[in-house]
């Protein structure tokens, strides 16, 4: 049996809820961006830059960034615990799974920090 030591939530229900809420946030963001693009037939760099540089969009982008990271972590945690098992890797399965999950966590941390720097960095 696989324990949830590396799981983002405390149990399956909280993981499920985080996954669903993050999916809704991502969907609302995409619909909002598509609405903006449709409403701006002559979109230029200045308009786009002003739109993305506004505080409400910086907040929305930050929320999207954390939603994508949470959604990705839970999804890939589920995949690694389902497929990196002793049936595929023998006795080394736990070590392989831990290394893969640590690599995913590190990449997600870099993604979050880089994204926050782009959103709030100013330049």
Image (spheres, rainbow, N blue to C red):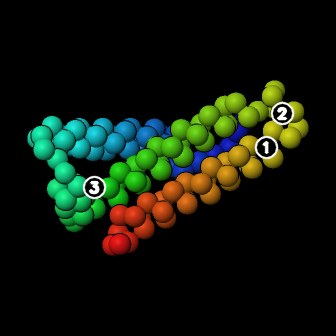
Distance between mark 2 and mark 3 Cα atoms: 41 Å
Name which residue lies at 81% across and 27% down. Answer: 87
Q: Is residue 57 visible?
A: no
Judge the density around disc 1: few (<14), some (14-19), many (≥20) Cα neighbours within 10 Å: some
Q: Position of residue 8 (x, y in %)?
A: 54, 50
Q: Quadrant of residue 90?
A: top right
Instruction: Check if mark 1's residue and mark 2's residue have beta carbons within 8 Å.
Output: yes
For disc 3, the marked residue is 60
- Number of the label disc, if any, that sits on residue 96: 1
Query: Of all residues shown, which one is farthest toward the right?
Result: 91
| 21 in relation to 57, above or below | above
Q: Residue at 33% across / 72% down in the picture?
A: 122
Marks 1 and 3: which is nearer the front?
3
CA separation in Å, label 1 and label 3 = 36 Å
Q: What residue is shown with label 2?
A: 89
* Closest to the observer, 91 or 34: 34
First-in-chain label (1 vs 3) = 3
Residue 42 point in image, percent of width and height = 13, 44
In the picture, the quarter occupied by the N terminus is top right
| Mark before the other along the chain sequence, 1 or 2 | 2
- Whether residue 53 appears in this view of the structure is yes
Task: Give residue 123's mark.
Answer: none
Q: Residues within 10 Å of mark 2 (few under 14, many from 20)?
A: some
Instruction: Locate residue 46, reporting x and y percent.
Output: 19, 59
Q: In screen coordinates, is 55 left or right of 121?
A: left
Q: Earlier in the sequence, mark 2 or mark 3?
A: 3
> Residue at position x 31%, y 44% from top?
25
Query: In the rendered view, would you say 39 is above or below 82?
Result: below
């Amino acid at each position: 049996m696989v324990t949830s030591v590396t799981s983002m939530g405390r149990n399956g229900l909280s993981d499920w809820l985080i996954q669903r809420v993050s999916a809704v946030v991502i969907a609302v963001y995409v619909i909002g961006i598509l609405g903006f693009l449709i409403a701006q037939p002559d979109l230029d760099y200045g308009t786009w830059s002003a739109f993305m540089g506004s505080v409400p969009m910086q907040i929305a982008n930050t929320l999207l960034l954390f939603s994508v990271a949470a959604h990705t972590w839970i999804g890939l945690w589920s995949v690694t615990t389902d497929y990196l098992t002793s049936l595929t890797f023998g006795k080394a399965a736990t070590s392989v799974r831990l290394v893969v999950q640590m690599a995913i966590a590190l990449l997600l941390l870099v993604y979050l920090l880089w994204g926050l720097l782009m959103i709030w960095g100013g330049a």
